Amino acid sequence: MRLRNWMTVIFSLAVSSTVWAQQRPNVIIIVSDDHAYQAISAYGNKLVKTPGIDRIANEGTRFDRAYVTNSICGPSRAVILTGKYSHKNGFKDNDHSRFDGSQNSFIKELTKSGYQTAWIGKWHLETKPQGFSFWEILPGQGQYYNPDFLQMDSSKTRLRGYATNIIEDLAENWLDKRDTTKPFCLVIGHKATHREWLPDTTDLGRYDHIQFPLPSNFYDDYNGRKAAAVQDMTIAKTMTMGYDLKMFESDEEENKDGNINRMDPAQRARFDAYYKAIQKDLQAQHLSGNSLTEWKYQRYMRDYLSTAAALDRNINRTLDYLDKHQLTKNTIVIYLSDQGFYLGEHGWFDKRWMYEESFRTPMLMRYPGVLKPGTVNKDFVMNLDIAPTVLEAAGVKIPSDMQGESMLPLLKHTKQKGRDAMYYHYYENTVHQVSPQFGIKTQRYKLIRYYERVEGWELFDLDTDKSEMNNLYGKKGYEAITAQLKKQLSALIAKYEDTEAAALMKIEVK
């Protein structure tokens, strides 16, 4: 073959490779921390505005039945990465687990197939990321103000500013420097809206004009629910005046708080001006009992939602970046929280439970040309499904040991039937005295098995008891449905090969 012909072949192959790379969709996954679906205007909240997240809903699909396998932050991220339940990926709880980075992940599969991959922001998996082209992460939980970041060369750098803004800056910086001939997958891990609920100084007081209505079960007495009765995560008793609500007893106590003493003088001045005025007003009221509890609830909601405001604003920045750089049409954007969160329901904050506000997570997806704008999906989907969904979209074979299911057939309106039931398993038996638990949710019922801290069962009819207040387990007339649900639960335990749950259910798992 002549030299000219060889050059033509080589050029054609290079062009074909570049075109194929450009046709494969880019992927941005935005993972927040503890962001409740009921705090998002796209999910019906009339008192707050979340235009960034709403934009994904308006331009793509809102999932109304998205759930997690284990409602706690580190384990949830491990599930997203691996597409496997906690008992399979090894990261069961935040107290005793370290992520085994040598195991496979959807990121490793994408990297091998030619994608540039990056994780920027909150990681919270105890070990360094593996399989990424690039990463820059917060150590542990990270800090809201002037946070430290760990780099790939093991160095640590403190960056001045507010974490949510900085994480977006770093994400855009990586996008600016990427190889534009390759598709990319970027995971943006936000610290917001994790506990401390420290808003950006520009958002202090954003919701002070709103009096938030108490949830109908705010004063839940936990009758008939043993595990709920022994927990320690109530706004009334557990939420602290100093650490959580910034109402410190003295300047000395405030100065010892690690979230505050890292602020620079300008940040600290704005922080003190805002919270000290609130504290002065509180002291003048001399509140106690339910009046103090309800005051704490209002402060919690205002700080939490003000912290979420920066999260939403920076999600909008991500979308604007894609528009500005002509990346929108070929980029999948997925937003989800690592789990749901309590905003006063059952009198609680935090997560962990299989009850709906914790088990369910916000999830929205934009995929131009594939998903019809403004659609709502009612199928049961899980954070477990992110990995296989992204791999299918990228044209990469889904590993056989991934336990999630690609959502694309459901979203493309094929004849594929979605789940008729979901399996959940929470392991941690320390923080907030929440009992380990596993269970099943069907279209109508939820059956939960508690063990270790509390031994017992709960059964809820979600058609008649959406707030999960009336435990029907053991009550006359529910014997048949209980037996049926236990049979379904045992089948899911066997399917996902959860040996710990199998031992408690006295069933065999191959």
Image (spheres, helix red, strand yellow):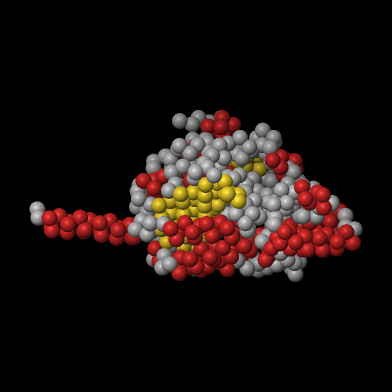
In the drawing, does residue 151 fall left or right of residue 214? left
Which quadrant of the rendered structure holds the C terminus? top left
Where is residue 282 drawn, in percent x and y?
85, 60
Task: Tell me: 255 left or right of 24.
Answer: right
236 relative to 383 in the view: left or right? right
Number of dots carrying numbers: 0
- Residue 430 placement, left or right of 485: right
**Residue at left 68%, top 53%?**
342
* Residue at the (67%, 66%) spot, across then down: 202
Q: Position of residue 142 (x, y in %)?
A: 62, 49
Residue at 69% across / 40% down in the picture? 431
Answer whether residue 120 is visible to the viewer in this image.
yes
Location of residue 329 by image quarter: bottom left
Q: Position of residue 420 (x, y in %)?
A: 50, 50
Viewer-side residue, 112 vs 276: 276
Give the camera-side residue of 507 and 191: 191
**Towards the viewer: 252 or 340:** 252
| Residue at image location 56% in from the left, 34% down from the top | 501
Residue 307 percent across, percent down from the top left: 66, 60
Q: Is residue 330 above or below residue 460?
A: below
Give the quarter of the image for residue 295. Answer: bottom right
In this orientation, which residue lies closer to the viewer: 452 or 22? 22
Please indicate, yes or no, whether residue 463 appears anywhere in the rendered image: no
Which residue extends farthest left?
1
